[in-house]
Amino acid sequence: MSGFLGAITSSSNFGPTGIDHQSLSVVQLSSVTSGTLAGVNGLIVPWWNNSQASPSQTAILNAFHSGTDLWLLEDDSSHNSLGTALGISSTNATNAFSNGSAPLFSGLFGTAVNTTVSGNFDQFTNIPALGGTIAGVNTNGEVTVAYWARGAFAPGSGALVIFGDVDTISNFTATYGVTPNAGGILALNTTAWLLNGAQAIPEPSTCALLGLGGLLLLARRWRAARAAR
């Protein structure tokens, strides 16, 4: 995740002189408890073994239901305990390109075309039933990326983003150079969406009316997003 970490803390991407003018600060947590999560506006959870995640699960879910944004980067049945605890059903996916639309696949940082997976990866089978929005589907019709705007998963909850494979945006498949690849664009667009309020995307008719791994936890302070609440 070092490439991702470098990209979201780069002043050329986020901050007054960046593509997205919103600023953020990043903290890597050595432990995840209700105490360490206090004051954290967003939490990114990459590839975390279920048994390792278990002691922190209650604190994370309580924070999410109290308004903390949550970004889950899953992988397989051994690394999906938080999604499972939220009732998100997942099964093994096939190895195929994923594409999607705004706000995650298309946004400030461009359009992510043909994002890839590596190793083990999941698909999600009940996103609409939980009030979520399908953001990305692979070429075999399997749901690989989904999101909930703030308050959409449950009253008072933070925003929720879930990916079926951490490798989609990690250093294995995503580069964050001058011209990021598809996984890099997807990661940066998702970060921007969270920073800028994580609002639901209007229906097309409304738009017309408006004229329009390793074990790593990154606690992110969505400062601009917090101010918007």
Image: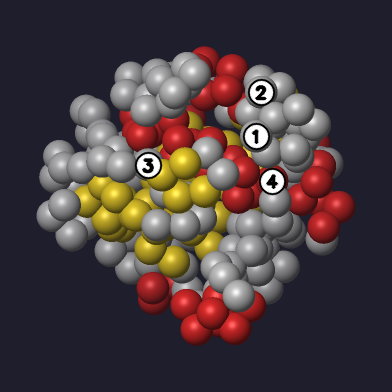
Q: Which residue is mark 2?
A: 12
Instruction: Say above or below: 73 vs 212.
Output: above
**Upstream in the sequence, badge 1 or badge 3?**
1
Labels 4 and 3: the sequence-earlier one: 3
Residue under the point 22% across and 51% down: 138
Amino acid carrying mark 3 in the image = Ala
Hey, which residue is sitting farthest front in the picture?
Answer: 211
Mark 2 residue element: loop
**Residue 112: assigned label:** 3
Q: Are marks 1 and 4 in contact (CB under 8 Å)?
A: no
Please rate how many residues cluster around mark 4, counting C-alpha atoms within 10 Å: few if below 14, some from 14 to 19, many from 20: many
Amino acid under label 1? Ile
Q: Residues within 10 Å of mark 1 (few under 14, many from 20)?
A: some
Q: Earlier in the sequence, mark 2 or mark 1?
A: 2
- Alpha carbon of mark 2 to alpha carbon of mark 3: how far? 19 Å
Of labels 1 and 4, the one closer to you: 1
What residue sits right under mark 4 in the picture? 195
Crowding near the residue tagged with mark 3, few <14, some 14–19, many ≥20 C-alpha atoms within 10 Å = many
Give the Cα separation between the discs numbered 4 and 2: 15 Å
